[in-house]
Each structure stands twice: as C-alpha cells, then as structure tokens.
Image (tube, grey):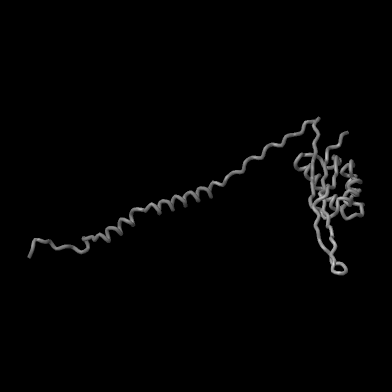
C-alpha cells in the first residue's frame, strides 16, 4: 500500500461546500442595504413628525380697525340682480341684515345670507370678535364669467343664451359705540 492515509469523506470539504458555508455566514452588501432601509422605515414610523406650533394670535390694538372678509365666487345669478339685494343691507348691523335677508323674496337673498353667516364665523374664529357686535362695512356684487349656451331657433338659426355669474363679497367691522 502507499503512504497515503485514508481520507475521511465527511472531513474533506470540497470548494463547492466551502463557498456555500461562507455565503451563509457572511451577509452580502445587498443584504446589509436592505436591512438598513428596513431600519430607517421603522425609525420614521416610530418618530411621527410633530406639527409646527401655530403662531399666537395677536390682539388688535384698540385704535386699529379690523376688517373681516368673506367671498362667494361663481354664484349663478347676475350681478345686477345681486346688487338689488346687497343695496338693502349695506351699512346695517349683522342682526338687521339677517332680518332683512330672511324676509327678502329674491332667490339671491339666500346666497347673501349664507355669505353673511360665513363672514360672521370668520370674525368669531379668526379674529375673536363677537358676531352680534359687527356691522357691514361693505358689500359688493361683481360680474363673474358668463357661460355661453345656444338655443335653436326658427329657420335653422341659433341664438346665444348668456348664463351670468357673479362674485359676492362682504366686509364686516366691529361697531363703534
């Protein structure tokens, strides 16, 4: 027999098995990048961003005049019809204007009433004013864009239908006593 010692098949490692064991033990660069990304996602989910604090509302100086504005755009009525109603409430207190609008039979009076309530809510929430102690400083009804439609007429003609819109604006201010 020769000088060779018997080889144990279990003790002998082939290059294939050696490569397989080293891959299992050492993570690759792709595995490390995936683990880092997962850790970053978990960290951002745990630490929710805190919202920035709201700036403190500044009280208005006694001599300074406050104007509270509300605007309704693209109201489906003509500015001319809206002006007929806004002329009634210009310069009135909020209580008087509510009463006038409640008893006005025109359809646009409902739009003015909603806008007045919006302006009062703006004054109470944004400027810390009391709604019943306000008066209407200014009301305007400006023309908005006109929707153009066509209606068929006799002998194959067509006439233009103009559906007018308007922009309504109310400015409120505290009453002076």
Tell me: 30 left or right of 124.
Answer: left
Which residue is located at x 85 percent, y 66 percent? 157
Tell me: 57 left or right of 155.
Answer: left
Image spot of residue 29 (x, y percent): 38, 52
Q: Nearer the viewer, residue 138 or 151?
A: 151
- How many numbered badges does the structure rendering display? 0
Q: Nearer the viewer, residue 131 or 163?
A: 163
Tell me: 52 left or right of 132.
Answer: left
Which residue is located at x 89 percent, y 43 percent? 90
Q: Nearer the viewer, residue 81 or 10?
A: 81
Image spot of residue 118 (x, y percent): 80, 47
Which residue is located at x 82 percent, y 42 percent? 171
Image spot of residue 9 (x, y percent): 20, 64
Residue 145 sits above or below residue 14 on the image:
above
**Quadrant where the image shows the N terminus:** bottom left
Q: Furthest-left residue in view?
A: 1
Q: Furthest-top residue in view?
A: 63
**Quadrant where the image shows the C terminus:** top right
* Occupied quadrant, residue 64: top right
* Occupied quadrant, residue 57: top right
Image spot of residue 31 (x, y percent): 40, 54
* Occupied quadrant, residue 60: top right
Residue 20 sits above or below residue 85 on the image:
below
Which residue is located at x 54 percent, y 46 percent? 47
């Amino acid at each position: 027999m020769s000088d060779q010692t018997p080889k144990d098949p279990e003790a002998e490692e082939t290059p294939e098995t050696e490569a397989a064991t080293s891959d299992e033990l050492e993570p690759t660069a792709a595995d490390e990048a995936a683990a880092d990304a997962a850790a970053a996602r978990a960290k951002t989910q745990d630490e929710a961003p805190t919202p920035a604090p709201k700036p403190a509302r500044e009280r208005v100086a006694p001599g300074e005049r406050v104007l509270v504005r509300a605007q309704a755009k693209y109201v489906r009525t003509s500015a001319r019809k809206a002006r007929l109603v806004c002329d009634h409430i210009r310069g009135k207190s909020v209580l008087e204007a509510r009463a006038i609008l409640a008893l006005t039979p025109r359809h646009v009076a409902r739009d003015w009433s909603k806008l007045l309530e919006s302006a009062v809510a703006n004054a109470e929430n944004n400027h810390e004013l009391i709604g019943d102690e306000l008066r209407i400083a200014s009301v305007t009804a400006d023309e908005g864009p006109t929707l153009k439609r066509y209606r068929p007429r006799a002998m194959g003609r067509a006439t233009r239908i103009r559906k007018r819109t308007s922009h309504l604006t109310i400015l409120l201010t505290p009453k002076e006593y």
